[in-house]
Image: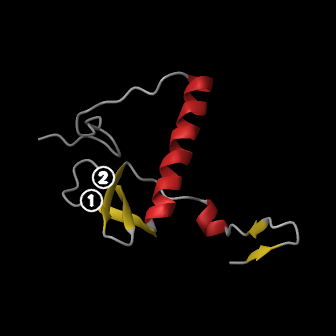
Amino acid sequence: MAKESNKDGQMNIELTEDVAEGVYSNLAMIAHSNSEFVIDFIRLMPGVPKARVKARVVITPDHAKRLLSALKDNIEKYEQSFGSIKQNEEFPQFPINFGGTVGEA
């Protein structure tokens, strides 16, 4: 992956096809030490007793604070365009037939 700076100080960032596809996550867990923040992006699937970490991102405390600010800014812009994001304080609930047919006994 190429990362270059041009004479204007702008960075050229390459996004490969496999990374551009993205990874679906419906849960994130965050841990930290004195030198880094570790964000695990997890995919929970109903009926599956084990959740999988799909991506782990390790960043510095400075970058974590900048990420928080960027997320806040983007959420505000999103809500201006699409309305308030409703938060559910409960653990995610999935439809009974999410991801397949319902078995019968």
* Quadrant showing the C terminus: top left
Query: Depth check: 44 or 61 in front?
Result: 61
Check disc 2: other Cα within 10 Å, few if <14, some if 14-19, many if 20+: some
Query: Depth check: 93 or 35 in front?
Result: 35
Query: Depth check: 32 or 81 in front?
Result: 32
- The spot of residue 77 in percent (x, y) is 61, 32
Q: Is residue 46 left or right of residue 56?
A: left
Which secondary structure lies at badge 2?
Answer: loop
Q: Is residue 56 left or right of residue 21?
A: left
User: Amino acid type of disc 2?
Assistant: Leu
Q: Is residue 5 left or right of residue 89?
A: right
Inter-mark Cα distance, 1 to 2: 5 Å
Cβ atoms at labels 1 and 2 below 8 Å apart: yes
Check disc 1: other Cα within 10 Å, few if <14, some if 14-19, many if 20+: few
Quadrant in the picture for residue 97: top left
Check residue 44 in the rendering and tell me which mark sits there, or answer none.
Answer: 2
Which residue corresponds to mark 1? 51
Q: Is residue 1 left or right of residue 58?
A: right
* Quadrant showing the N terminus: bottom right
- Residue at the top extreme of this rendering: 83
Q: Residue at x 20, y 43 (%)?
A: 103
